[in-house]
Amino acid sequence: MAATTHTVTNQVPPLVGHDVFATDRVLSEAVERHIEPGILPVALEELGELGRAAGSAQAQKWGAQANAHPPVLRTHDRYGHRVDEVEFHPSWHRLLGHAVSAGLTDAWGRPAGHVRRAAGFLVWTQAEAGHGCPLSMTHAAVPALRTDPELAAVWEPLLTSHTYVQGLRNPREKAGVLFGMGMTEKQGGTDVRSNTTRAEPLSGEGGYLLTGHKWFCSAPMSDGFLVLAQAPGGLSCFLVPRVLPDGSRNVFLIQRLKDKLGNRSNASAEVEFDGTWARLVGEEGRGVRTIIEMVAATRLDCVVGSAGLMRQAVAQAVHHSAYRDAFGGPLIDKPLMRNVLADLALESEAATVLGMRLAAAYDADTDQERAFLRLALPAAKFWVTKRCTAVVGEALECLGGNGYVEESGMPRLLREAPLNSIWEGSGNVQALDVLRALSREPRALDAFLREVGKARGADHRLDAAIKGLLTELADLAGIEARARRLVERFALVLQGSLLVRWAPPEVADAFCASRLGGDGGAVFGTLPHSLDLASVVARARPSSG
């Protein structure tokens, strides 16, 4: 066979060996904006190290291997003893260990902790998204446990540790632990108040025995879980350890692992409790209120994780277009492709800026910021996570047939993209939560309007969109049926206001024209041709070392 028929030309070099953090101008600017100067140098050094690791060939190999070798359930050992263990590929443990050592479960007790962690989570998600689940739940368990100071004193130092310890044993013998969560059941799903798992108090011990099931329990090899169950006083929150204080295994029967669309490296299980020991967290009958802060924190991770997936997809599309020639020149210089890339870049930038603003609100922890989060967080979770799938799908198409093959990594991103829209409450749940905030917590709307009002007068399209939103809020007829439309407007107005304040003029102009001014179509690549699209694309371009 003639060697000349196998000459390889016009193929794009892999996007590898680059600093995922430093080459993301939007994220690095957000970190500099939200972290005070005294802490900033340390934060930038941490994130730079993580960014270089995320862009390395080694981390990319770990991600591919963890995805290609899903976890395996072992219910029994060779002698017939019940063990209920899940085995992960070594690359999963390497990814998880690196994330823990980088502080991705440590936000609540260090300066600018939430901004630093959110930025790191967005960066490291781009190496492999599946292992983000135990990171997210471990981080989010802290506020729930703080309702019981005694429990928090024992568990919080382990949850926020920068040491990853593999395997199940007495938590008091470990330098760090991971947590999971079990809320949904097969008969109820999101309607957790219909849960049937029973919690029977043990006399004189302060513990309970649980009997029931959980339909989705992610990361079942975690050291502990926060779960909901029906106690004598009503639906309550409980801590279920995998290993009891005496070193014996708790009853934690893993029935099967879910065969999922994406998120293949992570184990999601169906779990049965049958006389499972648990400790009450908070008060009986107040389980939802106790666990709600954990849910809120994981919703922020849904926003940030989706922003990470978008960033990786857009970076790959821009990188490919910069190196691929077609019809006499680089794709990136073709007006129509430039329009598509700029449109994708706008969506990615808006998601990142919004996610980091929410993380900064957590760090501020004032009454005003908490009220802002009450409305902005579910609206952001609704919108950003839904846009993720569309962005990744269009970015894949930018690579053409090369993007459709597994070796490109784009199919893995596309399978992962819908997850965050479903996890911790799907779209309708988020929309209804916004309505609940509007009806029960008027301060939330006031805080939201104060936030977007900081950009009022800077762009006439934003001003008109804010006015239109207020008009919609004045009409309560059929409000539930209109909830998605309303929440979409909340998210777009908030993103527009943040970009007008902080993004370059060409980015803010393009966003307001297309998302708020109606000068854009229903698909990507329909931005007004008169905009400075080349600058928008250049801002989104990564570099490979």
Image: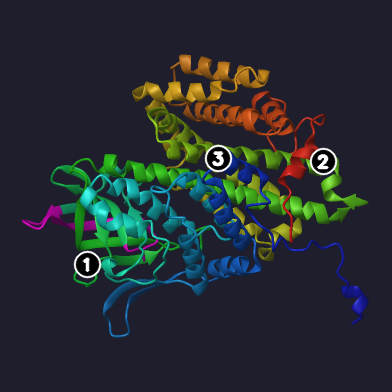
At x 58% / y 30%, what residue is drawn? 492
From what the image shows, is residue 426 above or below residue 432?
A: below
Q: In which quarter of the image is the C terminus?
A: bottom right
Whether residue 181 is in magenta: the answer is no
Which residue in the structure is indicated by mark 1? 244
Q: Which of 457 and 398 is in front in this view?
A: 457
Q: Is mark 3 on a helix, strand or loop?
A: helix
**Left or right of 514: which side holds 134?**
left
Q: How crowded is mark 3: few (under 14 residues within 10 Å), some or many (20 or more)?
A: many
| Numbered mark located on residue 384 in the image | 3
Say which of marks 3 and 2 sits in front. 3
| Numbered mark located on residue 336 in the image | 2
Q: Nearer the viewer, residue 25 or 280?
A: 25
Give how far apart the Cα atoms at labels 1 and 2 are. Answer: 61 Å
- Measured as percent of width and height from the top left, residue 167 is found at 36, 72
From what the image shows, is residue 319 above or below residue 36?
A: below
Q: Which residue lies furthest to the left in this view?
A: 204
**Left or right of 271: which side holds 88?**
right
* Amino acid type at mark 3: Val
- Measured as percent of width and height from the top left, residue 465 is found at 60, 20
At x 28% / y 66%, what residue is drawn? 171
Q: Give the range drawn in magenta.
A: 200-223
At x 45% / y 24%, what residue is drawn? 447
- Measured as percent of width and height from the top left, residue 502 is found at 63, 32
